[in-house]
Amino acid sequence: MNTKEHINKFKSICIGCGVCAGMCNYISMVEDEMGAFIPKVDELKCVNCGRCIKVCPFSEHSKNEDEIGYLLYQNIEGIKYNWITGYYLNCFEGYSEKHRYNSASGGLATKFLEECLNNGIVDEVLCVGSDTGKHLYKYVFINDATDLKKHSKSAYYPVDISNAMKKIRNENKKFAVIVLPCIAKAIRLASLYDKQLKNNIKLIAALTCGGLPKKSMVEYVALKNCISINEIKKLKFRVKSEKYLNKNCSMQIITDNKTITSRFHGDDFGFVYLNRLFNHLACNCCDDIYGECADISFMDAWLKDYDKDILGTSIVITRSKIADSIMKEITMNSNYIYQVSIDRAIKSQTNVGLVYRKKKSAYYKTKLYKLLGYKVRAKRKMKVSILRRIIILIRACQELYIQSKSKSLWIKVQNREISIQDYDKIMSKIIKRNKNFLKWRKL
Ligand SMILES: Cc1cc2nc3c(=O)[nH]c(=O)nc-3n(C[C@H](O)[C@H](O)[C@H](O)COP(=O)(O)OP(=O)(O)OC[C@H]3O[C@@H](n4cnc5c(N)ncnc54)[C@H](O)[C@@H]3O)c2cc1C
């Protein structure tokens, strides 16, 4: 298959990361009607080199996380492997007192990146920060550690990395990047073909991921509050408040004269995010929860011990020696961070259903997607009983149906053919009907 065919056929399972565009001057990232980034090839200039296919994290022609992990970590002393987390060295749990309130979880990601800059391990950190332009978020380069906390918290929002990749490839500096698991994989794949990129990126940090929504998720919450997406001046997620538990995550929409906060429990944000109504299709086909191709991964401690936690606690997995030694040093100088068993990381994501939804289901789901004609890479096979396989396939069909219905209705909302209340009414009914269908089987 040539490059143009690949990109065109692949659009539906593209995560919109922009790594292909970062590696090729003839691909640019554009927004589709749902506010997802998709690659656009300059057909007159494309020479069919096929590089974009090789670096795409979901492409049939790319390596899987185990194969990349083996290349990266096989010779590291003390490296271990777990089928849920992939390769790992150590696991840590706790928080940074200084960063916690202003961070998504326990603030360990910001603390770690600060240490990378302060110790001269890297010259610049690439992270995600607010954008005053129409995209609301963008990748930003930081060289002063004190600036990092301005960019803490999680962006549950699409961000295009292509221009930042081009800068990293063209400069003689050492970089740390913080990205989602699929982008960590794409950068590793790109590094196999680009020596400069490989040399310049000293550290890849990943955020554990349950799925990436499109911009239309924000548009939905805004519209429900009578705000048009163009009025939004700033968007924030995971804003903390003493009145709410950390697990009741928030989205905050800020306009010139209003601030709207919507939460997981009983609010519009929870309705669309937890039902994955605006997620990328690619997320349905993903079996990497933890960012297995990254040197280090950060996640929420979704554990019973922290059920009443207001400020948030982090769990961290290390895979490279450098990341591990930085975390050990941070741990040594803190009373609130401990080295723990990897089971804590597994439990934290099992508790929010991710191990079942991503790790155990992806192989069977991608088989179904292939049958439906999608060109997606087969995922790693996890053995599950025949009954579970059937349930996985039914759920995969339900997920596809719900998401495609949500998309078609949303386009009608945008075209003012139906109201947002109509969208709500129809989607609530569909979700309820689909949930009831498998209610007898608690899995
Ligand atoms: C889409 C998405 C889904 C997630 N799903 C889960 C989940 O299911 N389970 C779980 O345990 N954790 C999940 N996380 C991670 C979690 O929200 C926290 O980001 C993580 O625990 C780190 O918290 P912290 O307090 O250590 O980070 P902070 O100190 O708040 O620092 C976060 C760092 O990440 C960067 N960043 C934020 N958003 C992005 C982004 N979209 N892409 C790249 N870099 C970014 C920021 O610039 C900052 O440097 C998800 C995050 C995202 C963005």
Image (cartoon, rainbow, N blue to C red):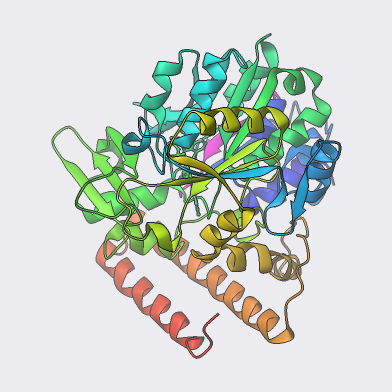
- At 23% from the left edge and 46% from the top edge, which residue is drawn? 241
Name the side, left or right, on which 197 lies relative to 405: right
Residue 331 appears anywhere in the view: yes
Residue 278 picture quarter: bottom left
Residue 41 appears anywhere in the view: no
Q: Position of residue 206 (x, y in %)?
A: 59, 39
Q: How many marks?
A: 0
Name the side, left or right, on which 386 lies relative to 121: right
Find out whether residue 371 is within the magenta segment: no
Q: Position of residue 187 (x, y in %)?
A: 70, 33
Question: Which residue appears farthest toward the bottom when viewing the image?
Answer: 440
Q: Is residue 136 above or below residue 91?
A: above
- At 35% from the left edge and 74% from the top edge, which residue is drawn? 428
Name the side, left or right, on which 328 lies relative to 93: right
- At 41% from the left edge and 76% from the top edge, which residue is drawn? 431
Question: Which residue appears farthest toward the top when viewing the image?
Answer: 172
Q: Quadrant of the C terminus?
A: bottom right
Q: Position of residue 354 (x, y in %)?
A: 56, 62
Q: Is residue 426 above or below residue 104?
A: below
Most foreground residue, 83 or 92: 92
Find out whether residue 33 is within the magenta segment: yes
Q: Position of residue 249 (x, y in %)?
A: 34, 52
Q: Is residue 66 above or below residue 297?
A: below
Name the side, left or right, on which 294 lies relative to 421: right
Residues shaded magenta: 25-34
Most foreground residue, 416 or 98: 98
